[in-house]
Amino acid sequence: MTNRWWLYQKERFPIFAHGPLILAFSLSAMSYSALLRGESTLRPAAALVAFVTAFFFFLQLRIADEFKDAADDARWRPYRPVPRGLVTLRELGWIGVGAGVIQLAGSLWLRPLQALMLVIAWVYLALMSREFFVHDWLKAHPTFYLLSHMIILPVFDIYATACDWLMARATPPQGLIWFLAVSYLNGIVIEIGRKIRAPEDEEEGVETYTVLWGRPRALAAWLGAMGLTALCAWRGAVLIGFATPVALLLLILLVSATLVAIRFARHPLPGRGRHFELVSGIWTLVMYLSLGAGPLLLRFLQGGLR
């Protein structure tokens, strides 16, 4: 029993890969909100609830995908855990419900209004799972599919940032929109990056962006999303007095990503498509830490030295 669930997480929701990224996401959302309000610390209990809720929320996103893609997985990807019988959709459904109970209890423990924001995120997740009731149209327009589904990230970001400003009995600080934009665009970077593949790695029935758009356009879209993310991150960093370090760091990452894309464009060898998922993950992790948790820690240390 334990072994099969360990195998499931390894294949579909690797906790040691996703955990640090989700921790950076939740802490930085709260940290950026605190920085905008002129604070240098977070409430530990609220930070814990934000992380646990975010972790389970991304797990619920994975579980929702298992239900949504069940027919396609059975036809085209029988090697995945659900179609090959490692776990069942019923079991995954109960895990999602159990996670929801924990999320709701933690949110209510903070404040009832915090729970309302969680419910709003759940509603959007439910609409996503039903493809907003326009499945055929979205399938025919993959760009709109991508753009509409990534809205879930800023929607949940509102919950995560509220673990700071709502607990402080304040209103959402001005400038928070830049962090929401960064989250939205980071989601696009990750989504495109994980669906760029070499010709030999393409699978029948799997709609990667290198198939849908062609390799040049897919690479351009990935780099373009990174560029827009960097611009929004820099604008957000200006508001917390951290513009120069963020700009230099993102410039280094952008140059590195461009070199990876050029190499792949010239020599799309088997296996190299995985580099884009790795670079996208590093990009997102560094982005969040440099925009939220890192500056907050520095401000806290500077305050302690005075």
Image (tube, rainbow, N blue to C red):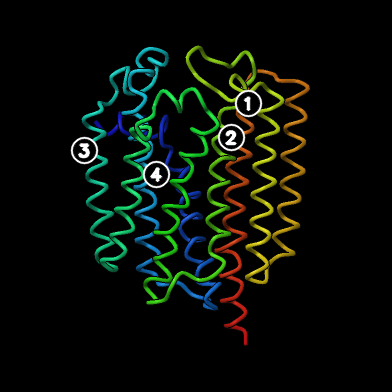
- The answer to whether the residues at label 4 and label 3 have Cβ atoms under 8 Å apart is no
The residue pinned by badge 1 equals 273
Any mark on residue 58, and which?
Answer: 4
User: Crowding at label 3, few (<14), some or many (≥20) Cα neighbours within 10 Å?
Assistant: few
In what element is the residue under mark 4?
Answer: helix
- The answer to whether the residues at label 1 and label 3 have Cβ atoms under 8 Å apart is no
Task: Locate residue 250 relative to residue 46 in the image: left or right.
Answer: right
Tell me the kind of residue under disc 4. Answer: Phe
The residue pinned by badge 3 equals 94
Dot placed on the residue nearer the N-terminal end, 2 or 4: 4
In what element is the residue under mark 2?
Answer: helix
- Quarter occupied by the C terminus: bottom right
Task: Locate residue 54 relative to residue 286 in the image: left or right.
Answer: left
| Residue depicted at 59% across the width and 64% down the height | 294
Front-most of residues 142 and 199: 142
Tell me the kind of residue under disc 1. Answer: Gly
Dot placed on the residue nearer the N-terminal end, 1 or 4: 4
Front-most of residues 242 and 270: 242
